[in-house]
Image (spheres, rainbow, N blue to C red):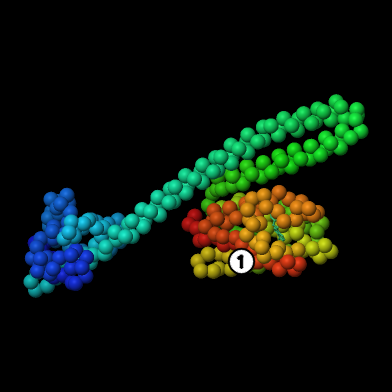
Amino acid sequence: MNEQGRIKYINSQTRLLFGYTREELIDQRLEILIPERFRKHHPAHTTAYMHSPSVRTMGAGRDLCALTRDGREIQVEIGLHPIHTQNGLLVQASIIDITERKIQEAIITRHVIELEAKNRELEQFTYIASHDLQEPLRTITNYIHLVKEDFGQLHTELPMYITTIEQSAKRMQSLVKGLLDFARLGRDKVLVTADSGRLVTNVIADLQNLITHSQAKIFISDMPHLNVYETELQQLFQNLIINAIKFRREFVPPVIQIASEQVEGEWRFSVRDNGIGIAAEYHERIFHIFQRLNKDTEYEGYGIGLANCKKIAELHGGKIWVESEPGSGSTFYFTIAKLNA
Ligand code: ADP
């Protein structure tokens, strides 16, 4: 357009975008391409621009509305470029139709909002349910205690029955607590720059008894500093290391290798063990809450550890999975997206 705000040259893409012929546009005022409600103020904007013309690149924050020949409004991004010619100042405008992008953005935003609301609801539900389950359990445990004290000597079988009830109640208590912790996970998360190697050494220090007792050997390769939810990530490492020790083969001291690798803009960590391994058909299921494979064996557990790990990896925009050879060991992998602290 020229200094007076009239269209002087157009390319064929502009014709396609707006649906006009060349003749219909040339020498028209630019306002022909602008929705009615913006037209009044536009000449003033044009005059102001012509007084101090500058290059305006396309980009966020300059999303505008345009009008096609058949009256449709489209969303556009416009870049402006002044050109000084013998015949005066011309301004070249580059126009991109971003209507489709805007629709996609709106859909994504709506999905994110819905998902967040559902997550909050679910978290609240689990939280309340767990609290309510804990109440009667406490009563059961207290009364068992009283029965044991008052009547324990009267019946020979009674102590055994009571012990069984007591153990079940305790297990239930632990499961409910596990569920509660699972629901709470990530509630108070704080993003910090942390040394992942230090998180692993903290875990190893905490597990010293277990490590000595099982004669486990743990090797750590170079580990990065990265932005993470520190407490949660340490818990992830802890769960994987405990499992690597817990699911060891009989008479085979655990050897655990912890490593990291940068893959396509994310960090990929691995925890490899030489334990009992996991059959391929269970590789998905073990990450669901309360899913355990070795229930009837000597391996104790609640089936919550890996569900927590999955939630933590996902809090970090990552994934978790396992590769395993039954009888010779498993490698758990998880990724952490590069987050901004
Ligand atoms: P838990 O350890 O309390 O049973 P998890 O959620 O940590 O629960 O693990 C789920 C199941 O996955 C375990 O019961 C076990 O069968 C299997 N598993 C987890 N880690 C390993 C491992 N390193 N080696 C073999 N099996 C494993």
Please state the horizontal and vertical placement of residue 306, each as a whole percent of the image: 65, 54
The percent coordinates of residue 216 (x first, y second) are 77, 62
Question: In the drawing, does residue 228 fall left or right of residue 89?
Answer: right
Return the x and y of residue 265 as percentages of the image width and height. 50, 66
Residue 237 percent across, percent down from the top left: 65, 57
Q: Residue furthest top?
A: 150
Quarter of the picture containing the N terminus is bottom left
Q: Identify which residue is drawn at 12% across, 69% down.
A: 22
- In the depicted structure, whether residue 57 falls above or below residue 40: below
242 vs 221, nearest the viewer = 242
Residue positioned 75% across, 38% down in the render: 169
User: Does 255 sit above or below residue 146?
Assistant: below
Nearest the eye: 185 or 188: 185
* Ligand 1 quadrant in view: bottom right
Type of amino acid under label 1: Ser
Residue marked by disc 1: 260
- Answer whether residue 251 is visible to the viewer in this image: yes
Q: Quadrant of residue 294?
A: bottom right
Disc 1 crowd rating (10 Å Cα; few below 14, some 14-19, many 20+) is: many
Residue at (55% x, 68% y) in the render = 262
